[in-house]
Amino acid sequence: MTKKPTKKMQEANASAKEVTPMMTSYAADESSSSPSRRNLSGVIERTDRFHNIDYGLVPFKYSHNTSNKSSLNIRDAIILCQKAYYNFSVFRNVIDLMTEFSCSSLYFTGGNKKSREFFEAFFKKINLENFLDKFFREYYRSGNVFIYRFDYTLKPEDVLKITQTFGGGVSEEASSAGVVLPAKYMILNPADIQYGGNISFVGGKYYKILTDYELERLRNPTTDEDRAVLKSLDEQNKTKLKKKTYSGAGAFVSLPLDVDRVNAVFYKKQDYEPFSVPMGFPVLEDINWKQEMKKMDMALTRTTQQAVLLITMGSELKNGTLNINQKNIEAMQGLFQNQSVGKVLVSDFTTKAEFIIPDIGAILDPKKYQIVNEDIQLGLNNILVGDEKFSSTNAKVNIFMERLNQGRKALITDFLLPEIKRLSQNMGFKNFPTPHFEEMDFKDTSVWNRVCAQLVQIGVLTPSESITAINTGVLPDEEHSVESQREFLEYKNEGLYAPVVSGPGAGAAPINTGRPVGSKAPQSTKTPSPAGGGKKTPAIASYSIKGVSEAFREFEKLQAKVEDFLKKKHKKKTLTPEQLQVVEAMAKDIFTNEEKDKWISSIKEYSSGSAKPNEDRISKLKEISEEHGIDLFHASVLNFSQI
């Protein structure tokens, strides 16, 4: 007898007919005897496939839909980078390396001599080198540098002394009121800074969250400065200050920072971002992962001293039964409970002992660190890695130096240059100088040193300029050169700095390298006098320092053209060091023998070896070479720069 289905069973059957299995799909033609089946796993979109990216840190908050889903905010990121710098050598060494390479001496161009001397003395007074070290460390560590300026007012007599020494156009009215100069520049902790402003993050205001120490000083002010800060707080912050504990959003006491005294420099920040994400933040998880593996390895290595001594006692009889003496086992256990008896074991032939040492060699294999180490090194752009080819290391060094140059430009553009303009306006300087960092060069400087020495011998550079050029790689501009030559002329008139070789512009009597004074020289062949009966005085050649610099630049361009020609001729992308030497020699031959308008057209002729030397030009260069004691190439440089 068939049971009649109930109403609930009918509803369940009806709903079951509408269900389609997730992993199967039937064809549309239900009349087919063999329905097709396919795997839907290939077309199912995986849920949360961008989970790790979506829950990453964002340094700002637009709305609830695009908010920072990470459990960290930008303040947490800065604090984590600071802690990583304090505790992990791989992070600290890279930051210190970038800081030390970025800190080089400043020099100034433009303006006038008095303004340059003023800023050199001023930055030396406030110890700018120490400030630069702190700036770059914070710049590469947290990416958010907040510079606070402490000012002091000069007395009228001090303003008069500065004006007399360095010039300037400070009016009497401004002098009597007092000129304000910076006394110190201080780096604020970016973890204590909050931002409040408009929607475009332009023209907003920065607030400093007061620490516990600062709060206690404000609750019990003892100095005039503390009372002034307490007085400047609004009523809301004064109410918060009276509380002993702080909880909830906005409960901290924040002090608005004077926008005229605060200067913010950020590491690669967009305009719509209030703060910058630190450079080292992306590698913090890798560093943490590596530290966890190290702790695990240290825990395992401590187990190596806990080796187990396995002692087998007794024997098996012929009938299969075991011959075990329980008393002997207890005696053996009592023997090894006494740790003083640990190296001597006396037993009969029935006792067998062996040490069981844990096999942890596979677990301590350093291969598991390979991937995480590579990720950390690539993330921090660490150039001190090793085990790489020279070309790869050279490329990484160039990228590393370019990153440092970006940081140095950011410091000059965002802080130093605006400060110099502001101070020049206060001191009344009509023109202000431009600061520059000395260039970092890891190439061989022997050629550059020889060039500087030759420029000193021919009088283009003064001794002080040559020492500066050798140490810094910077040649003086036209204004600097004229000032130095005028000062140097006074020393030469006194007989100081006598040149090694005599020549045009030496400014002193030539050094006598011939016969002693008073000795008779043999009769020499007389040279016919020129028309008119008078003696012909040789013309004194003069050379332009700008022309010398231009000559070297033109030679570098010519050398590059020769290199491109040979690459195209031999169908090579790069040339070997030996081939580059051939390029340099060929470029020197063209530079020496040909005029500038024939350099490019004669490359093919010189590459085939069919070029002939220009005797007239070589003869002229030999005269310059003998006159100044230099080779033909440097004589060509002087000939190029001759006025």
Image (cartoon, helix red, strand yellow):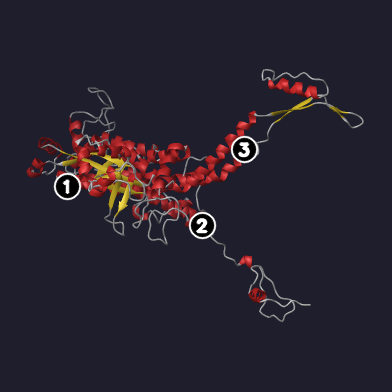
- Tell me which residue sits at (89%, 28%) in the image: 317
Q: Which residue is mark 1?
A: 425
Tag 2–tag 3 contact (CB < 8 Å):
no
Q: Nearer the viewer, residue 216 or 475?
A: 216
Kindly report the distance in space between the C-alpha atoms of the residues bearing marks 1 and 3: 65 Å
* Residue type highlighted by circle 1: Gln
Element under disc 3: loop
Left or right of 62, for residue 21: right
- Tell me which residue sits at (71%, 76%) in the image: 35
Q: Nearer the viewer, residue 93 or 254?
A: 254
**At which x and y percent is residue 616?**
34, 47
Q: Nearer the viewer, residue 349 or 247?
A: 247
Kindly report the distance in space between the C-alpha atoms of the residues bearing marks 2 and 3: 32 Å
**At which x and y percent is residue 433?**
22, 45
Left or right of 80, for residue 17: right
Q: Nearer the viewer, residue 350 or 471?
A: 350
Q: Which residue is mark 3?
A: 364
**At which x and y percent is residue 405?**
36, 46
Other-residue count near label 3 (Cα within 10 Å), few / some / many at <14 / 14–19 / ≥20: some
Give the number of the disc on residue 51. 2
* Sequence-first tag of 2 and 1: 2
Q: Quadrant of residue 45?
A: bottom right
* Residue type highlighted by circle 2: His
* Sequence-first tag of 1 and 3: 3
**At which x and y percent is residue 54?**
48, 57
* Residue type highlighted by circle 3: Leu
Tag 1–tag 3 contact (CB < 8 Å):
no
Element under disc 2: helix
* Sequence-first tag of 2 and 3: 2
Above/below status of 546 relative to 224: below
- Tell me which residue sits at (62%, 37%) in the image: 364
